[in-house]
Every structure is written in structure tokens, then in C-alpha cells.
Image (cartoon, rainbow, N blue to C red):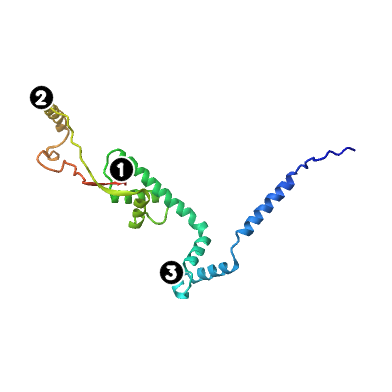
């Protein structure tokens, strides 16, 4: 029998599966928290207290480290909500960009309204209409208040165009009046209710003129 030198041995499927399981077990063992920290966490959960109240009552020296440990243990349950809140902010930013591209003025209440509507679509228990959440959106996307500068329309109109449009308006109104009773018809030419109030400020991205 002739044996070839430097012949590589083939790894069977069962050996590959065994190695993969072993690697997973090692990773799981490395991620296992210490027993002392686990006991601290269990004691904290049994107390049913707020983190700050628990720290002050039991005089925990490393308060920041204790908070980090609690968040690390509860990361799995909170990571889903954190990602949802980030998605809400992203949706609000998309709506903001869409409205500004259309030339609309945006204010603080608009951000609150959009965030509240998006929080309902994500089935979040807390509505995202708080001041702190809205301020976090402004900080993240660098929204600042700017004064609105109106540009005048320089298109000139002649007297003939004005007369033609006025005659056209009267003709259209005369066609609509018979469809309504007289007590439903009002003359609003000399009132201000048919004018849309112009907003002097709007939110804009910092650095954009």
C-alpha cells in the first residue's frame, strides 16, 4: 500500500457540527455575568425601587457602575423599545424634510404631533409628545428656529388682466349661488377670515440659509 505524504484529512459533517456547538458554548460561557453582580441585580429587583432611590438608601459608592450593570442586565428587554424610539425620530425627520421641501413652515407643535402619531403606529406605551423627546429630535437633527423671509412676486399684471379675472370670478359665483339658500351665502370681501395668517418663524436645519 502506497501512502501519499502531506495528504489533508477531510473533516466530516459531524465534526463540523461538534465544533460549532463547542464554539457557541464557549461564547455563552464568556458572556455569563459574575455571581456577585447577579446577586446585586436580584436584590435590586426584589426591592422594587427606583435605581436612584436604591443607590441613596443602600449608599452604593459606584453609582454609575451600578447603573451600567442594571442596564446591561435589562438590555434585552429595552433594546426593542430603544430601536422603536429611534425609528420614530427618523420618521419625524422624513416628514420634516418633506414639509420643508414643499415650502411649509414647521413649528415645535408639528414635531410633537408627528412623533405622537408615529408612536401609535409602533404601539409604544408612552406617547412621544413630551418636551424632552421633542428636544431630543431637535438636537439629533440640528433643528433651529429661523425667521421667515418672504420673497415678493415681481410678475406685473395689467388693468385688462384684472378686469378679465374679476368678470370670470363673478360668472363662476353666479353659477354657484342658485345651489344654496340665501341664509347660507356670506360676503367675505371686507373681512379678514379668508386670509391665512403668515408665520414669521419656522424650524430649519442648522447651517442651511
Measured along the vertical axis of the image, is residue 69 above or below residue 135? below
Q: Secondary structure at mark 2?
A: helix
Q: In the rendering, at what x and y percent does residue 31 appear? A: 60, 59
Q: Residues within 10 Å of mark 1 (few under 14, many from 20)?
A: few
Describe the element under mark 1 as helix, strand or loop.
loop
Q: Which of the two discs, 2 and 1, sits closer to the camera?
A: 1
Image mark for residue 52: 3
x, y (%) of residue 209? 28, 42
92 relative to 48, above or below: above
Q: Say how many tags the image has.
A: 3
**C-alpha separation, residue under disc 2 versus residue under disc 1:** 42 Å
Instruction: Determine the CA span between mark 2 and mark 3.
Output: 76 Å
Q: Which mark is residue 12?
A: none
Instruction: Tell me: 107 left or right of 54.
Output: left
Query: Which residue is at 51% across, 68% downward?
Result: 45
The percent position of residue 74, horizontal first and vertical second, equals 51, 60
- What residue is drawn where x is 70% and y is 48%? 17
Q: Quadrant of residue 2?
A: top right
- Does the CB distance between marks 1 and 3 fall below 8 Å? no
What residue is shown with label 1? Answer: 208
Q: Earlier in the sequence, mark 1 or mark 3?
A: 3
Instruction: Using the numbered discs, state the Cα–Cα distance from disc 1 to disc 3 in whole angstroms.
Output: 41 Å
**What residue would you read off at disc 2?**
160
Amino acid at each position: 500500500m502506497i501512502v501519499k505524504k502531506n495528504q489533508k484529512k477531510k473533516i466530516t459533517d459531524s465534526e463540523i457540527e461538534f465544533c460549532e456547538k463547542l464554539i457557541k458554548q464557549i461564547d455563552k460561557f464568556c458572556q455569563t455575568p459574575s455571581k456577585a453582580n447577579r446577586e446585586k441585580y436580584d436584590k435590586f429587583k426584589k426591592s422594587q425601587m427606583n435605581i436612584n432611590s436604591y443607590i441613596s438608601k443602600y449608599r452604593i459608592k459606584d453609582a454609575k457602575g451600578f447603573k451600567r450593570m442594571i442596564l446591561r442586565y435589562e438590555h434585552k428587554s429595552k433594546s426593542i423599545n430603544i430601536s422603536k424610539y429611534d425609528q420614530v425620530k427618523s420618521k419625524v425627520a422624513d416628514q420634516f424634510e418633506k414639509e420643508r421641501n414643499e415650502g411649509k413652515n414647521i413649528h415645535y407643535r408639528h414635531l410633537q404631533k408627528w412623533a405622537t402619531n408615529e408612536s401609535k403606529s409602533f404601539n409604544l406605551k408612552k406617547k412621544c409628545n413630551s418636551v424632552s423627546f421633542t428636544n431630543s429630535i431637535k438636537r439629533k437633527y440640528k433643528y433651529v428656529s429661523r425667521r421667515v423671509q418672504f420673497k415678493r412676486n415681481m410678475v406685473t399684471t395689467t388693468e385688462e388682466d384684472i378686469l378679465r379675472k374679476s368678470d370670470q370670478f363673478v360668472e363662476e359665483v353666479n353659477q354657484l349661488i342658485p345651489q344654496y339658500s340665501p341664509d347660507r351665502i356670506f360676503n367675505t370681501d371686507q373681512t379678514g377670515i379668508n386670509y391665512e395668517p403668515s408665520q414669521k418663524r419656522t424650524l430649519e436645519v442648522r447651517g442651511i440659509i
